[in-house]
Image (cartoon, coloured by chain):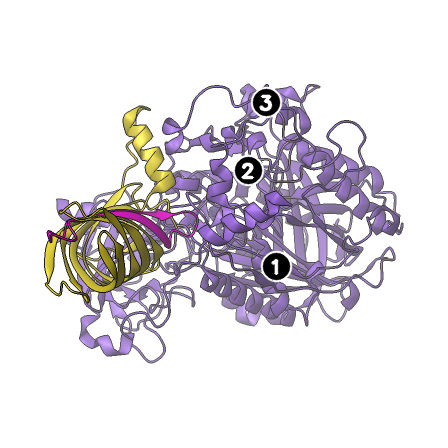
Chain colours: A purple, B yellow
Amino acid sequence: MSARIAAAVLCAGLAGCTTYRMPGGSGPASDLRERTEGLLTAGTARADVTPPPGPSTFGHGPDALVAQGYWTRLYCRIFVLETAPEDRVALVACDLHSISSILHRSVAERVRAIVPTSRLLMAATHTHAGPAHYFDAAVYGGIASSRRPGFDPAMVEFLAARIAQGVERAYAARRPVAARWVHTSAWRLTRNRSLEAYRANGGPPLADPPGGLDLSEEEKAIDPALHVLQLEAVDPQTRTRMLGPAGWIVLFAMHPTVVGSRNRLFGGDAYGASSRLLEAELRRAWAHRCGATAAPECARLEELDPPAAILNTNEGDISPVWSTGTAAEAIRVGRALAERAWATYAEDARVAGAGPAWLAGGAGFRNRVALDSRYLEVDLPGAATRSSGANATLCPGAELGEGSGHGASDHPVSLDSILPHGADVDPDRHDCQAPKKRMMGALQTLLVGPARTSFPSHAPFALLRLDDTWLSFVPGEPTVHAGAAINAGVTAVAHQRDGRAAHAAVVGLANAYFQYIATREEYATQSYEAASTLYGPGTADYFRDRFLLLARSMRGESIDGELRPGEPRVGEAVELTYQPGPLRSRLPGAADGASLDSLGDVRRQRGLCRLLRTPPGVCFWWSDGAPGRVAIPDGRFLGLVRAESREPVRTCQSARPLSSPWMTVCDPGAVVDDRGLQFETRARGHSGDAWLWSTLVQPSREQWAAMAGAGPVRLSAAGTAGVRPVESEAFGAGALPAACAADALRFCLGEDDDAPR
Amino acid sequence: MGVGVASPGWCGLALGLSLVFSGCSLSAGAALTRPSGRDHSLAIGPSVEASLQLPRTYQTVAGIEWTQSRTASDAWRLGMSYGLTTLPTAAGRVVWEATARGGLLGAARDAGVGGFGGLRLAMLLRLGRLRDPWQSDGIADTAWFLVADAGVNGLAGGGRSLESEISTRLLLRMNLGSALLP
């Protein structure tokens, strides 16, 4: 009791703690019977969640810099799937670092007419070039969680509103589909960054690489599993005739952290590139099909844009193989993953050889599948596992270890040099968190806060079955071994009525964020991931146990008897409170600065020059409105238009196509604008109401080739409704702008914010 | 914006302490006091103050101040202050602080040591160019402020009966901050 009083006094005296109600509560599931197969429908949408410049990035801890602009747009790719309203799920894959509880619940509150909280399944790609400031736990908004940290309710509102609108669009776009899973593997893209901890698990490697691959030990110690869910639109009358791709979901284990901590641009990193390259192929596949059939969709081919979402799996200790940390390298890594995923379709003779009238059932696509889900919330502090042995309960409080402060081996935290050095294991510790060496000792509580909600504490676990594959939505980052244990447990319980093998994959960073989940053996090493496992050595066992319970529930068993009195029931999203980190205004407001309309002729080109690269790049800088005023998340902000007609410049390809029998077919959605991979756009500063902006455009060879036939073009920065765009001088492939002078080059590359004279 | 911490040592220790307690500031300037009792004369003298923004909101400040009023009955003051600041949330030039203060005051003519306590409201005017968020996210950063404060104090002991006082100060403040703090 005295500790509670002391904590309360400390809290009140130092922080002025304010408690907020978590939205999105909902009751337990009423029907937990095992679901049978039904005709599948799916609706998809894309929600742009790119904030304007000004918020911090998140993921590199104290090295996560404030974003000055964006490289790729950040998207949430949304799939509403159902065979009946009772099994409808909304699956949301976002280009964000992770999903916070407040974000999940805030979206759930908005879309409760479509799905209950328990069937809103959100996951993040784990880009470290997404925004901060949307985490309800104080530790992720407090000191050193990023540069200029803080919790901003406006950021939660911004993200939640846009994602909810996307869910509504996806729901409205539902149509009959057929689906198939392809389970394959991808080597040489990733490596294990905590090999010592991985080895502590003992036993043989989890996966054997194929012969002939010359791999390092780190490259062998991975989970190479690549799971691809392919959804294909089918004719609504027959529900069997296959029309074209409706969307893909790709699952793979990799931190998408090619772009390093010096980055100041929002972006999707390697997974952002993978998605875009796959989406170009899905559009191209439609164009190919429409060349042979007359589906009604073919009349609006340019509007067809099926999403290709990437979900991360057990990536806790898995890094991409990278060296330079540039955007170009992120594209290279993303392309390599996209090639592996695309090969499952384009190199499948059953698909490549399918005629225009191919039917569901061909190539393994099924229009009738089982779709089921389970959801269970738990308060983690002190929760008991069903596993026997020592540390069978989670620790009563969360804690970061000394090893967490070092950062991951591939992106060490720069402040590490001032932290105490030596072993990260505390041999004298014998409590629940042993052998974790507490980072900063007692100062950790002072700086993070004594409240149990200072760290995340309430965990949602969700299990989704789609056809023959079970996906465990893990609110954190399981290591390879921790994720494999969950998968093994789920497949042991899961069963298929038709005799096909059951597959399982974890979906990391889902619905909440509890940092890493390391195995008990890894925990003993106090590697970076283990030291960041908040609730002690039993965490992985406990997580596995919850998913086993959910798998049993999905099989039709009652698990009520194994839930403690007062614990949330299956499907229940309980009422919660939270105490976030300090409230700070970080998201630029839509009312900040002067309206674009009032700026008049101030909005104009300030410079245009050519970068001497092969192929050439173009730098354009101009005066415009404040970051919250311009239309970044509302469609195209920057793009190439024809000088006279102002029509967007369309090209046959945005980039070199991925291999397929129809790769010479044009991508009907190929345009040169900032929703692709070619623009780096920055706000540079302001003088009075006018803000200086710049963009560096690096068209691909394919785009330059197409521009050669397009005549004069301009770069155009969109205005808002009724406000004219800002346009550059006309130029073209045959009449390039003048070469950038040295000061202009530094400015364009972001090395100097002063505008060239 | 570089981190630039190459090795542990005093530099690292200073940065580490700055990380923990940062938002520390040092102010110096002139104070002007006017007691309401028998000594109605205006007193003016130097004043210095050091303060810290406290974890975890960094909107609570605690400080120590020393003022030499240079009157015979109020030669020096040494006090502590505690209150609130808008510094972490202020986006423009103006920052507000409201603090309670109390401490000791000493007289020059062997009148013993007395005490003082009161309330103070300060307006801080940020000097120099306002920077955009991405221009001000360094691990260590300095900012300069002109501080104008006004307060009401009660003075006691030191050979005097309880009396009230109006005080005002004009200070130049250097704030050592860090973008690691919210």
Q: Which residues are magenta?
A: B50-75
- Tag 3 residue: A525
Q: Amino acid at mark 2?
A: Met
Quarter of the image with the N terminus of chain A in it:
top right
Percent across and percent down for residue B111 are 19, 48
Q: Look at the image and tell me whether residue A661 can be seen.
A: no
Badge 3 or badge 2: first in the primary sequence: 2
Q: Which chain is mark 2 on?
A: A
Residue A258 occupies quadrant: top left
Residue under pointer 2: A254
**For the point 48% across and 42% down, which residue is it?**
A446
Real-space CA distance between mark 3 and mark 1, rounded to the nearest whole angstrom: 35 Å
Per the image, label 1 sits on a secondary structure element best described as strand
- Is circle 3 on the same chain as circle 2? yes
Q: Position of residue A220 (x, y in %)?
A: 59, 24
Q: Is there one chain holding both mark 3 and mark 1?
A: yes
SS of the residue under disc 2: loop
Q: Residue at x 13, y 47 (%)?
A: B109
Residue at left offset 37%, top offset 58%: A672
A454 within the magenta span:
no
